[in-house]
Amino acid sequence: MKKAGIYDPYLDTVGGGERYAMTVAEYLLAKNWRVDIFWNDVQIKQKIKQRLGIKIEKAFFLPDIFQKSIWQKYKILKNYDLIFYLSDGSVPFLFAKKNILHFQVPFHGVGGKSFLNRIKLKKINAVVCNSYFTKKFIDKEYGVKSVVVYPPVAVEEFKPGRKENIILSVARFTDRLHNKRQDVLVEVFKKMVDEGLKEWQLFLVGGDAEGKKLVAKLKKESRGYPIEILTNISFEELKKIYAKAKIFWHAAGYGVDEGRRPEKVEHFGISVVEAMATGCVPVVINKGGIPEIIRAKKDGFLWTEKEDLLKITLELIKSPLKMEKISKEVIKSSRRFSKDVFNQKIYGLVETT
């Protein structure tokens, strides 16, 4: 039996990077590999199943080896056929037969081309990025030629339902490094209502582990308006809301110079694809990796300024036939990012690198 080890330093945030790494684990388990996940708290397994819907019951959770000395790491990691490591900006010493280093974030200015990193990279068989946006920065920073494998989205698990007049945004609530700018969405929706929009609701959904104060602030600002803020809901509940929504909003990176601060914009946009799989029409910000998902005006719309977001959304609301046509198109388009497509590309890396 082949043996793989997986490490994600942010596993307890259960976000997009964690979906990426755990889908690799799920795929290898399906191929009858033994999969070890280096994480000290085994209770994270239940959280992954609940929040991500990923089946990793057969994986083993082992103590975090990457906090040990280089000699201790060597003695353990040399016994693995594959190590898949999600980087926090650093380059680790990896000693498996094959080593894949994955970047979710377009790190820059971190000394990527240092002498020590160049030595470490000699043992890395493939550097993988989640979008061409991320790749542009990683290749320059670390002096590598990375491969793009778009994140896996369980599109087959998302189905359109009976649509209601709901605008939806799904994103982690955080006021730290990667602010999703739900405040912009609340502001624009309130303006739409003040100017006469009726019988529509805005739903903001996401985890609040990093943003309880932000959630409290948004709830205060939303009082008196048809705005629902839902935190830490299950994967099953999330699918039901996607199924009902007609329009999907995303604003991460609003007001950011992505050339200078690429880490502050969306590096891909998994929630955008999830929405598309349910026939929810994306009206999303034209920054980061999101433009790689949307073919403008064919299967969604891109905006730059708040006025554009408001105008595009109102035009869609006033054109139900147009919205219905695009809704059908986005369902088909979402299949480009399925787990099957992801698994095929990961298989290619694992088998050929």
Image (tube, grey):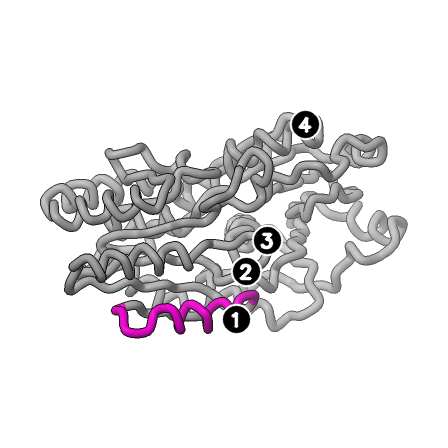
Q: Can you tell which of label 1 and label 4 is closer to the viewer?
A: 1
Q: Amino acid at mark 3?
A: Leu
Residue located at (22% from left, 61% from top): 193
Residue underneath mark 2? 175
**Is any part of residue 151 visible from this angle?**
no
Say the numbered circle drawn on residue 213.
1
Closer to us: 256 or 200: 256
Residue located at (70% from left, 26% from top): 143
Q: Residue furthest left?
A: 321
Determine the CA span between mark 1 and mark 3. 15 Å
Closer to us: 325 or 176: 176
The mark nearer the N terminus, 2 or 1, is 2
Q: Is residue 251 left or right of residue 39?
A: left
Determine the CA span between mark 2 and mark 3. 7 Å
Instruction: Assign the C terminus to one quadrant of the image.
Output: top right
The mark nearer the N terminus, 3 or 4, is 4
The mark nearer the N terminus, 1 or 4, is 4
Say the numbered circle drawn on residue 177.
3
